[in-house]
Image (cartoon, rainbow, N blue to C red):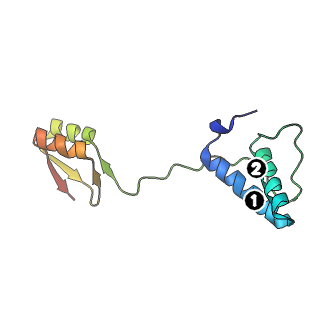
């Protein structure tokens, strides 16, 4: 049986969300809904104790989804390594518009005489 700590957080979130939606759709008292949601999430993550049974809602899917792709950074990042690479080839580093230049990259550029040029 897998450990919860070993399951990717996005898979946990997806499984819990589906389990809650399925439990609420079946209706009932709040406590019963919460218990159904918990059991459904445990079942879909392979964490259920004892034999597993299919979800009571026939349209529910108990299959695990592949992890979501890691989102790309919202904007480019210029690091110390970028500055060091530029220093080997000249005295200028072109920085994409709106890029985040790390403080260490700025310090290294200053120390190595590399101009950071946006564009």
**Circle 2/circle 1 CB separation < 8 Å:** yes
Identify the secondary structure beneath mark 1.
helix
In the foreground, 88 or 28: 28
Quadrant in which the N terminus appears = top right
**Where does residue 77 sit, x and y in percent of width and height?**
32, 50
Q: How many numbered marks appear?
A: 2
Against 58, is 43 above or below?
above
Instruction: Tell me the crowding category of disc 2: few under 14, some 14 to 19, or many 20 or more residues within 10 angstroms, Cα based.
Output: many
In the foreground, 51 or 34: 34
The quarter of the displayed image where residue 57 is located: bottom right
**Where does residue 63 sit, x and y in percent of width and height?**
76, 48
Choose the circle earlier in sequence order: 2 or 1: 1
Judge left or right: residue 118 versus residue 64: left
Residue drawn at (76%, 49%) of the image: 41
Which residue is farthest top?
A: 1
In the foreground, 55 or 32: 32
The quarter of the displayed image where residue 119 is located: bottom left
| Residue occupied by mark 2 | 41
Instruction: Tell me the crowding category of disc 1: few under 14, some 14 to 19, or many 20 or more residues within 10 angstroms, Cα based.
Output: some
**Where does residue 71 sit, x and y in percent of width and height?**
49, 53
Judge left or right: residue 114 versus residue 68: left
| Residue occupied by mark 1 | 20
Residue drawn at (24%, 46%) of the image: 103
Residue drawn at (79%, 57%) of the image: 34
Identify the secondary structure beneath mark 2.
helix
């Amino acid at each position: 049986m897998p450990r919860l700590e070993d399951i990717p957080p996005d898979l946990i979130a997806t499984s819990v969300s589906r389990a809650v939606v399925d439990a609420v759709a079946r209706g009932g008292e709040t406590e019963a809904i919460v218990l159904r949601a918990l059991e459904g999430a445990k079942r879909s993550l392979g964490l259920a104790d004892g034999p597993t049974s299919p979800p009571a809602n026939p349209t529910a899917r108990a299959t695990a989804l592949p992890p979501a792709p890691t989102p790309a950074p919202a904007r480019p990042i210029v690091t110390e390594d970028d500055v060091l690479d530029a220093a080997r080839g000249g005295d200028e580093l072109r920085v994409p518009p709106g890029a985040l230049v790390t403080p260490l990259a700025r310090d290294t550029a200053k120390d190595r005489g590399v101009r950071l040029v946006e564009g």
